[in-house]
Amino acid sequence: MNDATRRGLAELSLSFERRYGATPLLFRAPGRVNLIGEHTDYNDGFVLPAALDLATFVAIAPRTDRLIKVHSANLDRSFTFDLDVAQERRRDWSDYVRGVAVELGATGHRLPGADIAIWSTLPMGSGLSASAALEVAVGYALMSVAGEPIDRLELAKASQSAENAFVGMRCGIMDQYISCHGIEGCALLLDCRSLEATPIRIDSRARIVVANTMVHHQLAGSAYNERRLDCEQAVAILYKAIDGVAALRDIDTAQLEMHAHLLPGRIARRARHVVTENARTLEMAAALEAGALETSGRLMNASHASLRDDYEVSCPELDLMVDLARGAPGAYGARMTGGGFGGCVVSLVEATAAESFAARVAPAYEKETGLAPVIFSCFPAAGAGSVAI
């Protein structure tokens, strides 16, 4: 934890005491960057995310009633709800908090009322999964003050259900899973069907560099759900022609090529991205294990091309940032990360070149767009837990 974060947590704790008159417990849940495996999680496929040291922090103290009182330090907004009253979607940030409480209650957990203050170092809408970090941090904190043991997989599932059923975003489980299960120094190769994960250590010769384009196009949410429907349509057609197909994960590239004529053009492109992305993800995990950084970079480049051309979730700013990142000295490869239509680009960069990366890329991006990007080198962090300052 760096000094700026420690100061922020100290201020969060002090402001909590002023607001609620109690000394809080502190919890965190990290955001994530996905090295490869985009839009494969809700197709039962493979992903390769790493938890970040950027996180959402929750200060909490139990109440004697069933009220949940919440304040966001970042937004300077507050709301209150009653755990004994049915909750309805508000279509704002409060849905993530109320949704987790609703889902945990629905699975049999008797949560107490609580006073909560939230502070995050994660930029919203950047593709670093600030929403999942919020869900997991709140869920972890509520379970802790309830005195219940934390089942990380159960918490990940409840957080995903909150986003699916309450928020209305039909995301897969990757973001919530890595926020719960992150391992310091490692990405996780996650099988989104079995929910089995294999740690993949990041070679010390390389750094993960994240560049925030500072754009977030508003069609992201609806377009995300549309892509999922496209994938479901592909499965509905292909399961009649290929035995055992329950998701696009069950199809390899040869089978898809053989049966692509059955799919409408747009649906065929969506399926091609998912099928080839699954193959790239497995190949990149093996390459990282073997220290084959050039191969890993090539696979990241191919992933971006597929997301841009077949899945159509990139945008001019992402494409520009990827081009600039690839042209920087020491860069192995770069791709958009997250749902798309803005947010961040992730690059794999030689460790010795990581410091100079931002100095080269940021001015060139700002010259073209007028936007000053935020670029940082990161180290994979641990998953959700308690915090001491």
Image (cartoon, rainbow, N blue to C red):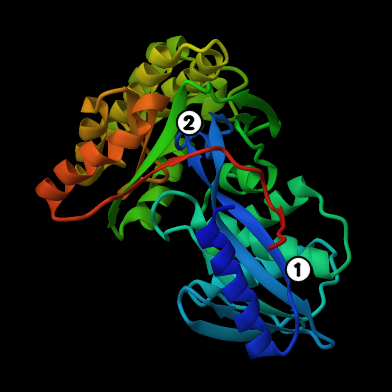
Q: Residue at x 19, y 38 (%)?
A: 320
Q: Is residue 269 visible?
A: no
In this picture, residue 278 sits left or right of residue 212 = right
Up-down relation of residue 353 to residue 142 (above or below): above
Determine crowd level at label 1: few under 14, some 14-19, many 20+ residues with C-alpha closer than 10 A: many
229 to 48, vertically: above or below: below
Amino acid at dot 1: Leu
Q: Position of residue 120 (x, y in %)?
A: 52, 64
Which residue is situated farthest in the front direction here? 3
Q: Residue at x 81, y 72 (%)?
A: 111
One can see residue 49 in this view: yes
Looking at the picture, tell me which residue is in the foreground, 43 or 76.
76
Q: Nearer the viewer, residue 110 or 291?
A: 291
Residue 161 position in % (x across, y down): 64, 56
Q: Which residue is mark 1?
A: 142
Between 346 and 302, the one lying in front of the other is: 346
Using the numbered discs, state the Cα–Cα distance from disc 2 to disc 1 in whole angstroms. 31 Å
Dot 2, crowdedness within 10 Å: few (<14), some or many (≥20)? many
In the image as oriented, which residue stretches furthest toward the left?
Answer: 367
Marker count (numbered)? 2
Q: Amino acid at mark 2?
A: Gly
Question: Is tag 2's residue or tag 1's residue first in the polypeptide sequence?
Answer: 2
Give the residue number, with chain letter if any, for mark 2. Answer: 37
Contact between marks 2 and 1 (CB within 8 A): the answer is no
SS for dot 2? loop
Mark nearer the viewer, 2 or 1: 1
Q: Position of residue 325 (x, y in %)?
A: 26, 32
Quadrant placement of the C terminus: bottom right
Reply above or below: 338 against 133: above
* Disc marking residue 305: none
Residue found 44% across the figure and 44% down from its top:
229
